[in-house]
Image (cartoon, coloured by chain):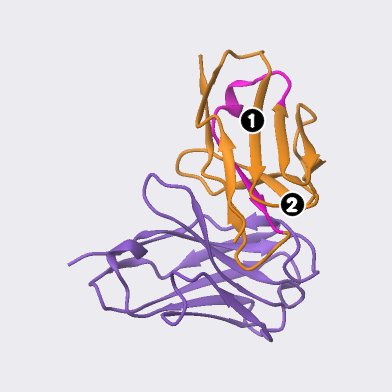
Chain colours: A orange, B purple
Amino acid sequence: EIVMTQSPATLSVSPGERATLSCRASQSVSSNLAWYQQKPGQAPRLLIYGASTRATGIPARFSGSGSGTEFTLTISSLQSEDFAVYYCQQYNNWPPWTFGQGTKLEIK
Amino acid sequence: QVQLVESGGGVVQPGGSLRLSCAASGFTFSSYGMHWVRQAPGKGLEWVAFIRYDGSNKYYADSVKGRFTISRDNSKNTLYLQMNSLRAEDTAVYYCAKVHLAVAGTTAFDIWGQGTMVTVSS
């Protein structure tokens, strides 16, 4: 089973600033990596797939990068609606499909 | 629009059973694999089960193997999760999710339902 590790667990950033979230896989997942955003009481929403491709309707301030075992989600200029929990997920080696433990992005 | 709506959650005693449903609309349900994912209160996301578009293959997390059964009725555009021998640790919000690309399992989950809560407690 591939273990996904996200860091940091909590990230405090001011609105308008840049946020950088990290995700590491225990073995290579190629570019088969997705990022999801989840707000309280809501279902997860797909942001990024293929490590760097934005899903339909996702603003350009969200960008993903990386391949193999190291991945990054960058939010270029934080808006109030971006404060949420973010999960990475690998879909290269399955089953199981595995998620990171999440990074909570909070307002500084 | 593309939509998934779960139902069937509730409170059940340990050892009991429950069947969840996920009604799909707005896309060709019979062309896409489907997943169940759960989230325990205050915790992260845990993949539970996957079924291919035609029901030919099914996969389960070790934590539910032998107790849960995923199935689908493409004529009714509905996904199911039969949960037997429920345990306290199965308490979670259960989400159904659609695969992004109709290429088996090597694809992200692009559409999620709103979730249905399952509580296992005496």
Task: Please give the name of the residue rendered at 55% of the width and 27% of the height, measured from the top-left corner.
Answer: A83
Q: Please, which chain is the residue tagged with disc 1 on?
A: A
Q: Which residues make up the magenta segment? A: A75-91
Please tell me whether mark 1 sits on a helix, a strand or a loop: strand
- Where residue B63 sits in the image (x, y, percent)? 44, 69
Query: Given the image, on which type of amino acid does mark 2 rest?
Result: Ser
- Where residue B37 sits in the image (x, y, percent)? 53, 61
Q: Please, which chain is the residue tagged with disc 2 on?
A: A
Q: Quadrant of the C terminus of chain B?
A: bottom left
Please tell me whether mark 2 sits on a helix, a strand or a loop: loop
- Where residue A70 sits in the image (x, y, percent)? 72, 39
Q: Which mark is residue A28?
A: 2
Looking at the image, residue B120 lies above or below residue B46: below
Badge 1 crowding class, 10 Å Cα cut-off, few under 14, some 14 to 19, many 20 or more, is: many
B51 or B9, which is in the foreground? B51
Q: Where, by quadrant of the figure, is residue B107 drawn?
A: bottom right
Task: Please give the name of the residue rendered at 78% of the width and 44% of the height, measured from the top-left corner.
Answer: A51
Task: Please give the name of the residue rendered at 58% of the width and 38% of the height, measured from the top-left corner.
Answer: A6
Q: Where, by quadrant of the figure, is residue B79 drawn?
A: bottom right
B70 or B8, which is in the foreground? B70
Looking at the image, residue B105 lies above or below residue A88: below
Q: Which mark is residue B100?
A: none
Q: Where, by quadrant of the figure, is residue A15 drawn?
A: top right
Q: Which mark is residue A21?
A: 1
Task: Please give the name of the residue rendered at 47% of the width and 77% of the height, measured from the top-left corner.
Answer: B65
- Where residue B111 sits in the image (x, y, percent)? 66, 56
Query: Given the image, on which type of amino acid does mark 1 rest?
Result: Leu
- The earlier-in-sequence mark between 1 and 2 is 1
